[in-house]
Amino acid sequence: EKYVLLFSHAAKYPSDSLKRNSTPMTTDKDIVSQEMKDEFLGIKQQNYRRAFYNVTVKKVEARFRRQFTEIHKLVLPMSYQQLESECQKLGINIATLNYNPASCLVRNACLCPKCPFYLQASASFGNHISSYSYKLIPVSYTHLTLPTIYSVQISVVDVSLKKT
């Protein structure tokens, strides 16, 4: 019993030895027992809160990754004329966008039509793009970027080899 009382007293003042040594130790077992129960329940509640938070955050992160990946599967490169037309249609000032004619992409805005930040100029666009790599499982077709101003032709040749 004495050790339980000492432990309880020490647990009340874990990092303040002056206070622990100058405060009289409670010797009433019922009071100490209740204090220990309260402390245990407080720890238990913190653990429940922490566990709930961790589970919730993991679920939200997983949902975010799925949605972000789905929305950003198709990046839409465009010619400057296409970009002008799209900006006009959406009421966006094209002067706010940093267009790269070599890649037909915009450096400071998202070019995924389904994204809520589509053609929205942003100084922190890197943060938006960095979400893409955040704990994502790479998929070979995840980020299709074919410039729409070029045509693509794929041909398949049937070849058979015979040993002579």
Image: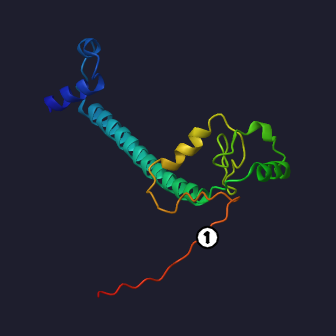
**Residue with the mark numbered 1:** 153
Q: Around disc 1, counting alpha carbons within 10 Å, would you say few (fewer than 14), some (14 to 19), or many (20 or more)?
A: few
Residue 119: x, y in percent?
A: 72, 47
Q: Nearer the viewer, residue 127 or 86?
A: 86
Q: Nearer the viewer, residue 23 or 50?
A: 50
Q: Quadrant of the C terminus?
A: bottom left
Q: Nearer the viewer, residue 136 or 52?
A: 136
* Count of number-bearing discs: 1
- For the N terminus, the quadrant is top left
Q: Quadrant of residue 76?
A: bottom right
**Where does residue 75 sit, x and y in percent of width and height?**
63, 55
Q: Residue at x 23, y 13 (%)?
A: 21
- Compared to 41, does 6 lie above or below? above
Residue drawn at the location 63% of the way across and 66% of the way down: 152
Task: Give, as a three-letter code, the residue at label 1.
Answer: Gln
**In the structure shown, which secondary structural element does the residue marked by tag 1 occupy?**
loop
Of all residues shown, which one is farthest toward the front? Answer: 164
Which scheme is used to colour this image of the protein? rainbow
Q: Residue at x 70, y 56 (%)?
A: 113
Q: In the drawing, does residue 78 fall left or right of residue 69?
A: right
91 shown above or below 36: below
Q: How far across and down, in percent of the image, does residue 97 sit?
A: 73, 40
Most foreground residue, 12 or 163:
163
Q: Position of residue 107 (x, y in %)?
A: 64, 41
